[in-house]
Image: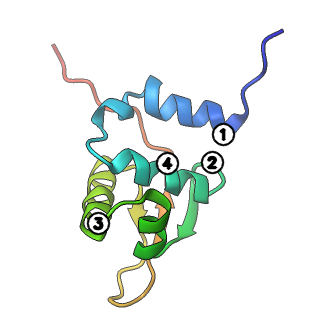
Amino acid sequence: MPVAMSTQTQWLRSVLFDRGYLARIKGEAIKVYLVMVAACGGRPDRSVTMSLSQLMDRTALSCPTVIDSLARLEKLGLVVSTTRERGKVKTYYVPDPPEPEVASL
């Protein structure tokens, strides 16, 4: 008997595979994205507050790599930084990203 997937698993599968974001996430950014998704309970449209050190600990990545990964994820629309104050722990929003636009033939 097949096991039903949870809503969170279906959403993540849809984002990464059906919408093609996995192929667009470069380098170590996939680790950062998965940590962000896990921190928000695997559900879209949620905010999560995480420091760079927390992200570094959970991904085993260096600070420059985490910063670069966050920039890549923001450019793709997979995470949105909602805190802009210098010296403050950032809050990120994990949206339900849209279907990528397909170029017209």
Q: What is the x, y in percent for residue 12? A: 55, 36
* Residue count near mark 1 (Cα–Cα under 10 Å), binned few <14, some 14–19, many ≥20: some
Q: Is residue 41 left or right of residue 85?
A: right
The amino acid beneath tag 2 is Gly
| Badge 3 or badge 1: first in the primary sequence | 1
Question: Cα distance, mark 4 to mark 3?
Answer: 15 Å
The amino acid beneath tag 3 is Ile
Residue 8 got which mark?
A: 1
Question: Cα distance, mark 3 to mark 2?
Answer: 22 Å
Which residue in the protein does label 2 denote?
42
Q: What is the x, y in percent for residue 102? A: 26, 24
- Disc 3, SS: helix
The amino acid beneath tag 1 is Gln
Colour approach in the figure = rainbow
Which residue in the protein does label 4 denote?
34
| Badge 2 or badge 4: first in the primary sequence | 4
Which residue in the protein does label 3 denote?
67
- Disc 4, SS: helix
Question: Cα distance, mark 3 to mark 1?
Answer: 26 Å
* Residue count near mark 3 (Cα–Cα under 10 Å), binned few <14, some 14–19, many ≥20: some
| Badge 3 or badge 2: first in the primary sequence | 2
Nearer mark to the viewer, of 3 and 2: 3
Contact (CB < 8 A) between labels 3 and 1? no
Q: Residue at x 55, y 51 (%)?
A: 37
Question: Cα distance, mark 1 to mark 2?
Answer: 5 Å
Contact (CB < 8 A) between labels 2 and 4? no
